[in-house]
Amino acid sequence: MLDFGASLLRRLPAETAHDLTLALMARLKLAPRRLADPPVLRVQALGLSFPNPVGLAAGFDKNAALPDAMGKLGFGFVECGTVTPRPQAGNSKPRLFRLSEDRAVINRMGFNNGGMMLAAANLKRRTGQGIVGINIGANKDSEDRIADYRTAFAELAALADYVTVNISSPNTPGLRGLQNRDELTRLIGTVLETRGAAATPVLVKIAPDLDEAALDEIAAVALMSGIDGLIVSNTTIARPPLKNAHAGETGGLSGAPLLVPSTKILRGVRQRTGNKLTLIGAGGIASGADAYAKIRAGASLVQLYSALVFEGPGLVARIKSELAECLTRDGYDSVSEAVGADA
């Protein structure tokens, strides 16, 4: 039923379909009863016990309105956001484009969200027990972006199981500059100082458009800083050959074309950090084999979003089933045994 509804939604403009999906799930509680996952998919990471490694990436539930409902679709964890300290309208429309022939999406949303106080209120109303992360960012017009991360973290960290510091969206001018060594060191230091003695895990989400020198610096800062992990990766500003007429739109490209380059970056991060950080692999996952490739490249957990646009919510169960088959086929008794096998 949900997958049939997804096919109807694909006939609407992309952002209209997204907003309608959120509204329907909120009002009609459109989520199936969750089934237990096979033991082979259980993961211990970030000090948390995940029923499976397949998570929903940030971008779907920007205001943390539906993490419990999304968890019931079978995700092992749900990441909400990106949330900024103050409400933000984002960039002008249209700003979200389906590239159906390419199984891809281009977005230039610009961190549109209702602000940290709305997200905090929504998180406080949660009734479910699933693992929920919150993704934080800076307001576009902020005079001190690092201060924005400090403010958002202080407000939201206690309400989530982990916090992701998003410095890699291509849709906020200058934001990716926070990935350079000095700025990243200062940003992480500020966030960890704000965390204090609390145990909330902190991750940083990086871009796929990084050269070898930039990867060296990010890995070095991450290892020295004391953060818990990295999410690899955000959307790309690169444009591989694409068929759809929207291929030239400005914004971040996600979906199938991102699978290979983001997995390459993930493998490079794993080679530089070993098993000292928890890595979450994101970018282009649309099957169990894709998720397995991320795990073998070094990810303990994976995230997806764009593939849901084309496949519908039934994709989650299919990916988990296929991933379990891949692990069993290769003689692994758990996800952790396969992490980094190809790195």
Image: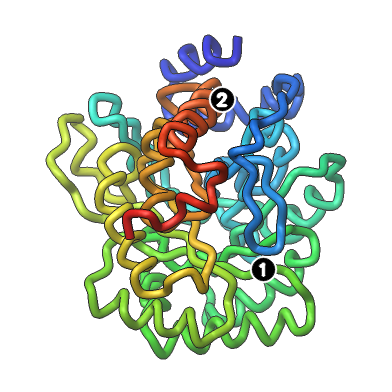
Q: Which mark sits nearer the N-terminus, 2 or 1?
A: 1
Q: Secondary structure at mark 2?
A: helix
Q: Residues within 10 Å of mark 1 (few under 14, many from 20)?
A: many
The quadrant of the image that shows the N terminus is: top right
Which residue position holds label 1? Answer: 201
**Residue at x 42%, y 74% (from the top left corner):** 273
Residue 317, disc: 2
Residue drawn at x 69%, y 26% is: 25
Q: Quadrant of residue 234?
A: bottom left
Look at the numbered disc 1 and give the secondary structure of its residue. loop
Left/right placement of residue 114 relative to residue 68 reads: left
Q: Is residue 14 visible?
A: yes
Q: Position of residue 324 (x, y in %)?
A: 52, 32
Point out residue 119 in the picture as x, y percentages from the top left corner. Answer: 73, 53
User: On the picture, is 318 further left or further right than 30?
Assistant: left
What is the distance, in whole Å, between disc 2 and disc 1 at their CAs?
Answer: 27 Å
In this view, the residue in front, 88 or 135, is 135
For the C terminus, the quadrant is: bottom left
Specify the amino acid type for callout 2. Answer: Ala
